[in-house]
Amino acid sequence: MIRLTATAASVVLLAGCASFSPDGGFGKVADLTTERTGQTALWQRSASETETVRVRVDELLKQPLTADSAVEIALLNNRGLQASFSELGIAESDLVRAGRLSNPSFSFSHTSGGGIVEINRSLVFNVLGLLTMPLARQVGQQRFEQAQYQAALEAVSFAAETRTAFFNAVAAQDLVRYYVQVREAAEASNELARRMFQAGNFNKLAQMRQQAFYADATSQLARAQHQTVAERERLVRMLGLSGNQLSFKLPERLPELPGTPAEPKDAEQTAMDKRLDVLMAKRSTDATAQSLGLTKATRFVNVLNVGYANKSQTGEKLQNGYVIELELPLFDFGSTRIAGAEATYMQSFNRSAEVAINARSEVRESYSAYRTAYDLAKHYRDEVLPLRKRISDENLLRYNGMLISVFELLADSRDQVMSVTSYVEALRDHWIAETNLQSAMTGRSPGSTAMARPTGGTAGDRALH
């Protein structure tokens, strides 16, 4: 009896050691996010934190947005991202549960007959759970760390998507101004052609060509105006804005092209060391290996309950004792659990290797896309636009010398504006490619939007039940 009491006391003491962390494990998530994005993520879990976020967002919206301020707002204010952070709380609850013994079970029976009443009582503890608790908690810790990496991956991926949405919105807004100029030039050309045709100084075919140019320019402008709305609204959704916050201002133009392209050193090794989906895959494999160890530890005995029991009977003294519940491995010697755990480990190992191989390939591909986008934007800036400017100046001189018509001058103006729009698009593609390159080295695959969450438990998890 004394030994059972001591055992019960030690169980209660061990269970009390498992508790929740003050920040829910988000400190590590914030550090990982800041290291990769330069901005801080915040998990809003109180009214004071929500108010702090509101004040900070309003302060940032008073000035025209930049890529960095847009990312900061998204990390603080997007509700979908905040919802994903709640997965940390779920993971931590599983970790704390792994450090606590299962609740004891109490049984009571009452029988009577022939004037005799018999009462049996028992209080049973899961002793096997106590013996495997250190290993189970180690597995839970591995899974909690994996959840931290998952939350950081969500934040970093969301930051990259926000930067892309910002560049698309600014470029779309900028392009509309140039399409307005194209339409105005086409409109002037169409009006002049119409009047000259009415005066008998222009043939019908040439007049219809000018009219077709004007119709195409009008269509292009309408599509560009809608694209501006669509890209801005996409950015609004990323930032989580509503109401009066929708009046935020975007810069008039994209950032200028850097003087020299980025030359990341050891980009592939950086991906192996810092890319979050690679680190998650490694943690997943480690956790599965730990689960396999737990499965082997409980191979033959999966149920072992020990507890206190007493019995009282009419006319007899109270009888005290203990009860033991033991699963007898008569039909299943644990081979199924071992086989399942080993297969799960090999599955995790091969998937981890696949993630690493794909990450290296994606870094190389992303760098090629980045250099191509940079070189194209530089080509437009240094070669195409200056050439178009010289052609325009020459045509103006020829027009002043009455060597070309006003229609040729207007057509050249349209061509020059279209070259400018091509440069804006190339500059936008450069900044997006730069974002994808950074994501490929430190976040996740540029072609994915979210990391697939693990489904179900491992064989080691099932061994706990």
Image (tube, grey):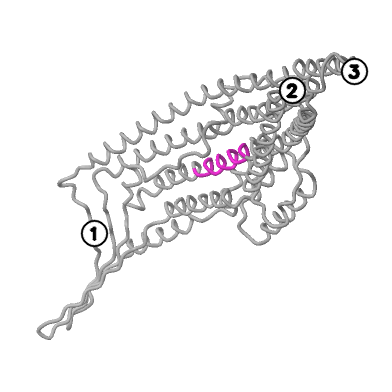
- Amino acid on which disc 2 is placed: Asp
Residue, far bottom? 115
Magenta highlight: main SS? helix
Residue, far front? 200
Q: Return the disc, 1 or 2, that comes first in the chain's sequence.
A: 1
Residue sitting at 75 percent across and 53 percent down?
A: 58
Location of residue 90 in the rendering, given as x and y in whole percent from the top left corner:
48, 53
Cα separation, mark 1 vs mark 2, equals 90 Å
Cα separation, mark 3 vs mark 2, equals 19 Å
- The answer to whether 446 is drawn above or below residue 232 in the figure is above
- Amino acid on which disc 3 is placed: Asn
How many neighbours does mark 2 have within 10 angstroms: few (below 14), some (14-19), or many (20 or more)? Answer: some
Q: Is residue 139 left or right of residue 145?
A: left
Location of residue 346 in the rendering, given as x and y in whole percent from the top left corner:
35, 31
Q: Which residues are magenta?
A: 147-161
SS for tag 1? strand
According to the image, label 2 marks what residue? 415
Which of the image's four quarters has the N terminus? bottom left
In front: 462, or 422? 422
- Which label was assigned to residue 324? 1
According to the image, label 3 marks what residue? 400
- The answer to whether 117 is drawn above or below residue 175 in the figure is below
Count of numbered marks: 3
